[in-house]
Image (cartoon, grey):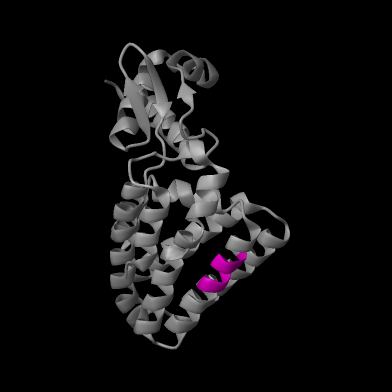
Amino acid sequence: MDKTDSSVQSAVYTALKNSIMSLQMKPGSVISTQKIADKLSVSRTPVREAFIRLQRDGLVDIFPQKETSVSLIDFSKINQERFIRESLESANIDLLIQMISRKNIADLEMNIEQQHATISACDFESLFKLDNAFHEYLFKVTGQELSWQTIERTSNHYGRIRAITVWNKDIMKETVLQHQKILAAIQDGSADHAKIYTKVHLHQLENQVQQLLRDYPNYFVQDTVPAEDKFEALLRAD
């Protein structure tokens, strides 16, 4: 494979993954190799290769001789992905307390101001990007970019349910307030408080799961455990 072919495959994969993660391509929707190839003006080969990579990511289900579809969001995977993120963010806070500068604080305050502005404008897509940028910046400050890359690479189900919550203005207002609390704790040099606020922040969607299941039932994996039992257990967990 030459560099041109590799570049095309990578571009197709990135375009499809972005569409899936932003929910432009909805969970459970059937996707066609030929239609994607026509839309992107490429051959079927890079699209098939992209589907294989997306299957490895858990974002696509391929049924040979039948169809390919965007995977449903799986709550069991959400919990595992969030565990990785919470562990890395918590460890990063200890470094942040030691390394963060006044300029870093000013940059994060500007990000939060922009978050408030996007809520006022109901620009929730931009708010979602600013949310991610806020957390990514915390890892840049400490030089732990690989940790953030790991979070992005392993948050394919957790990331999509977060994208759904962006559609709710009240949830996003609370998200911005949580960012402010995290930053204030970091400024005060309180690693313990920053970790507590981060945990609350990452677990906030547990308060919305029932509503999400009612509003978007076809987006989620249906299992044999009754939803009420499953989420009551989640809310009881530490």
- Seen in the picture, residue 43 relative to 179 is either above or below; the reply is above
Horizontal and vertical percent position of residue 226: 38, 47
Q: Residue furthest right?
A: 121
* Residue 201 in view: yes
Which image quadrant: the C terminus? bottom left
The stretch drawn in magenta includes residue 106: no
Horizontal and vertical percent position of residue 144: 30, 64
Measuring 39% from the left and 33% from the top, which residue is drawn there?
Answer: 71
Measuring 29% from the left and 22% from the top, which residue is drawn there?
Answer: 2
Measuring 31% from the left and 76% from the top, which residue is drawn there?
Answer: 95
Horizontal and vertical percent position of residue 147: 30, 59
* Residue 18 in view: no
- Seen in the picture, residue 43 relative to 143 is either above or below; the reply is above
Measuring 59% from the left and 61% from the top, which residue is drawn there?
Answer: 172
The stretch drawn in magenta includes residue 176: yes
Q: Residue furthest top?
A: 65
Q: Is residue 207 left or right of residue 91?
A: right
Horizontal and vertical percent position of residue 123: 67, 53
User: Which residues are drawn in magenta?
Assistant: 173-178
